[in-house]
Image (cartoon, helix red, strand yellow):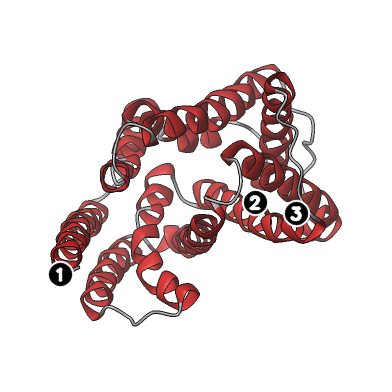
Amino acid sequence: MHAAIFLWGFTGLLGKLIQLNEGVLVWYRMLISAIAVAIILLYQKKIPKLSFRQIAHISGIGILVMLHWVAFYASIKLASISIAMVCLSSIALFVSFIEPIINREKFDYTEIFFSALAVIGISTIYRSDPTASAGIIVGILSALFSAVFSSLNKRIASKHEPLTISLVELASGFVFLTLLFPVYMKFQPTDKFIPDSMDWVYLMILSLVCTVLTWVLSLEALQKVSAYTVALALNLEPIYGIILAVVFAGEGKILNAGFYYGAGIIMLTIVLHTIYKFRKKIRSRILS
């Protein structure tokens, strides 16, 4: 699981290195990843058989995945890897609002309190660097899209094979982004559509190693460890991403004290939130 999360941490660094705008980058990532997953399914002779309604449902989630990736890489281009990663760390806190709405459950006001603390952390970073404001706003949108599709994925995870879900989501995101390009390019014009040699290397690493391989690794891990362990480990992804950004992208030189204060508040909030969720789960088991 940690191997998968460590590799996910490279997605931000690779997004910075690839000299394509965020829309074109995600277009290639979804195309390459979808082809790779399709090859795996063909090799395993597990061709998915889904109804039109099931495909439409999963495809809707795939569009959210695409929007999450586009917003995430836009945040990196507008601000920095570290900013995008810190914003990404608010996913679990968004989920605390979104899951009760989707599952029609009561809100947990303790979790809302944790969400408020996370907002304080993000606002601290926002105020400390006005030039990163656009990147922070888009980064928060990225986290919101991720929280929504993660919550929806939980509802269908037990109904279909994971690779089947992955293929439909990647393919639908690719198709929708292709259809969206004429409008998208009016707002984010670019002259570079064809990756150069190094861009192809980074795209292959991003798609095959940081997307497909990590998916397989995480599935293997889920057979060995509990969901709580996975959730706790996932909180390390932003930390790995920031460390890689500081070491390989030289972002330590551009990060100020406000960033570290805000990031510290967010990381502390995530740890406390995870502990609270664990104790809540144990308590519910005892009472049942």
Q: Position of residue 259 (x, y in %)?
A: 27, 54
Chain-order first, disc 3 or disc 2 = 3
Q: Residues within 10 Å of mark 1 (few under 14, many from 20)?
A: few
Contact check, label 1 and label 2, Cβ < 8 Å: no
Label 1: state its secondary structure: helix
- Compute the Cα span from label 1 to label 2: 41 Å
Q: Which residue is mark 1?
A: 287
Q: Label 3 is placed on what type of residue?
A: Ile
Q: Image point 49% across, 35% down: which residue? A: 11
> Foreground mark, 1 or 2?
1
> Which quarter of the picture shows residue 106?
bottom left
Q: Residue furthest front?
A: 288
Marking on residue 70? none
Q: Image point 68% across, 43% down: which residue? A: 170
Left/right of residue 19 with respect to residue 136 in the rendered view: right
- Compute the Cα span from label 3 to label 1: 39 Å
Left/right of residue 123 with respect to residue 162 in the rendered view: left
The quadrant in which the C terminus is found is bottom left
The quadrant in which the N terminus is found is top left
Of 163 and 34, which appears nearest the observer?
A: 163
Marking on residue 66? 2
> Foreground mark, 3 or 2?
3
Label 3: state its secondary structure: helix
Relative to 277, residue 219 above or below: above
Of 28 and 120, which appears nearest the observer?
A: 28
Looking at the rendered structure, the number of numbered marks drawn on it comes to 3
Left/right of residue 12 with respect to residue 183 in the rendered view: left
Q: Position of residue 138 (x, y in %)?
A: 52, 61
Left/right of residue 186 with respect to residue 125 in the rendered view: right
Contact check, label 3 and label 1, Cβ < 8 Å: no
Marking on residue 55? 3
